Image: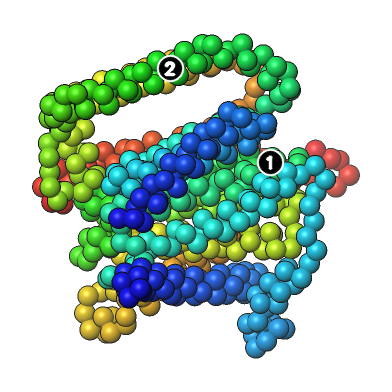
Amino acid sequence: MIVQGIAFYVFAALLVASGVMVISARNPVHSVLYLVLAFFQAAGLCVLLGAEFIAMILVIVYVGAVAVLFLFVVMMLDINFRELRAGALQYLPIGGLIGLILLAELAAVLGGWIIAPAAEKAASAPVAAMSGATNTEQLGQLIYTHYVYLFQASGLVLLIAMIGAIVLTLRQREGVRKQNIGSQLARRREDVVAIRKVPTGEGV
Amino acid sequence: MAEFWSGFLLPLIIIVLKILAIVVPLLVAVAFMTYAERKIMGAMQLRQGPNIVGPFGLLQPFADGLKLFAKEQILPVGANRFVFYLAPMLTFFLALVAWAVIPFDYGMVLADINVGILYLFAISSLGVYGIVMAGWASNSRYAFLGALRSAAQMVSYEVSMGLVIISVLLCVGSLNLTKIVEAQETIWFAIPLLPMFVIFFISALAETNRSPFDLPEGESELVAGFMVEYSSAPFALFFLGEYANMILMSAMTSILFLGGWLPPLPFAPFTWIPGPIWFALKIAFCLFVYVWVRATMPRYRYDQLMRLGWKVFLPFSLLWVVLTAGVLVTFGWLPK
């Protein structure tokens, strides 16, 4: 039990610290690397909660794919960070406001549980309690059996977003020579090779 | 005090000993993998390969290692010192830490976790960070180009690898590596899922930056790609990490498709040989094919690499996942 407690505080402290470093690091590449560290700590917390599937998916999706693309873009950008940082303070009021709203909402949720303990039960009621089944099976039951329509709907929203992104960025460029592997493979020897007997002193 | 000893210190010592029992043979295997690669390639190209240091050149990898560690460490001007040294350490660390979940025989595993295959997939998808960090921190054009190529390549091939893993998981009904091996008692998945086996193997080549997908290193165009600025011990760490990753990918191939520690046929002369030896033989077979491919194939062009990943492997493996699920449901073969 004590080891778990220590692990929780280590993960939580590192998570908060790396979160602070994400917005305060001078170099944006360092910021992204701190973000990766933050994802890792969050995955560690998920493992401590017993949500091992979520933890692994967090690492695979966010660390293994999303943050790699972040890093990719940030490394290629050539920005003057002094200039960028100069106007950062003018966003402080709106950022602070958003933070305050989030904090108030969290407090409302937690406070609601304390004031009315029945609310927590209502929130967790649709979750079928399965003892003994692994994490993955429970999630699968929940998503693909109980909430399959909502799941499909969210999938459709993502699909539309993806098509939209492709349509927005797609442009036809003129004069680009692309390799057409089909036509290359369809070439036959007779079409491209001609064997000629060349008599001496006359040329082709 | 006695409680502290039996409840905390003793398990800790046992775990450390278990880790050493995995890591030390692994590092020896890495050393002899470099030797085997040079010998096999030598034989395929009608050369001798290393044959001076020790009997049959067997001590060559140790001589090479000693040479590397005795060299001067060079930090390029304008390099980011912290990230520059962090990158090789990360590569090496990730190559070792993945072995925690690999089962060598029934119950012979350091951590038998429920989501073992996801853990392996997560760790192997992190490998790109070592390369990208190395390329960026070196402050060199060649290294940076290599790193960018590697990032795009690894993200692309992970997608088809994920789908291949899903089609195996459909046949198993569990994410636990031990259960995946046990599900192959009647037949190895390499036979019913043969196309997936081929795709997984090729994707593993791309994931480990091996020839014919060694564009991040591409010595004929990028000198040595992301590790062009590295020397001495950091270079050795990259080298060890890459070879350990190859062995890891071969182990993953054996577990997913070649029946892990199971003997090829379940009767007498085959069952006399213990499981870990079968497992090692299968890994060695996969590694031999890696070297064989390297000695045979020319390097892919970059756009062809991307085309293969996104336009060939991804649609095909998606189709195969649907097909596998359909067949399993139709014939009622779904695992409980």
**Would residue B279 be seen by someone viewing this image from the given angle?**
no
Pointer 1 residue: B136
- Where residue B72 appears, as percent x and y from the top left, is 80, 63
In-front residue for pair A47/B319? A47
Measure how far apart labels 1 and 2 are at the Cα level: 37 Å
| Image side of residue B42 versus residue A96, left or right | right
Question: Could you tell me if the residues under marks 1 and 2 are in contact, i.e. CB atoms within 8 Å?
Answer: no
| Image side of residue B196 versus residue A142, left or right | right
Tell me which residue sits at (89%, 44%) in the image. Answer: A201
**Would residue A169 be seen by someone viewing this image from the given angle?**
yes
In-front residue for pair B122/B260? B122
**Residue extending farthest bottom:** B55
Tell me which residue sits at (50%, 47%) in the image. Answer: B126
- Where residue B37 appears, as percent x and y from the top left, is 59, 69
- Crowd band around label 1 with a 10 angstrom C-alpha radius: few (<14), some (14–19), many (20+): many
Image-quadrant location for residue B178: bottom left
- Where residue B36 appears, as percent x and y from the top left, is 58, 73
| Image side of residue A114 versus residue B11, left or right | left
Element type at mark 1: helix
Element type at mark 2: helix
Q: Is residue A96 above or below residue B326?
A: above
| Image side of residue A81 versus residue A170, left or right | right
- Where residue B107 appears, as percent x and y from the top left, is 28, 70
Q: Quadrant of the N terminus of chain B?
A: bottom left
Pointer 2 residue: A100
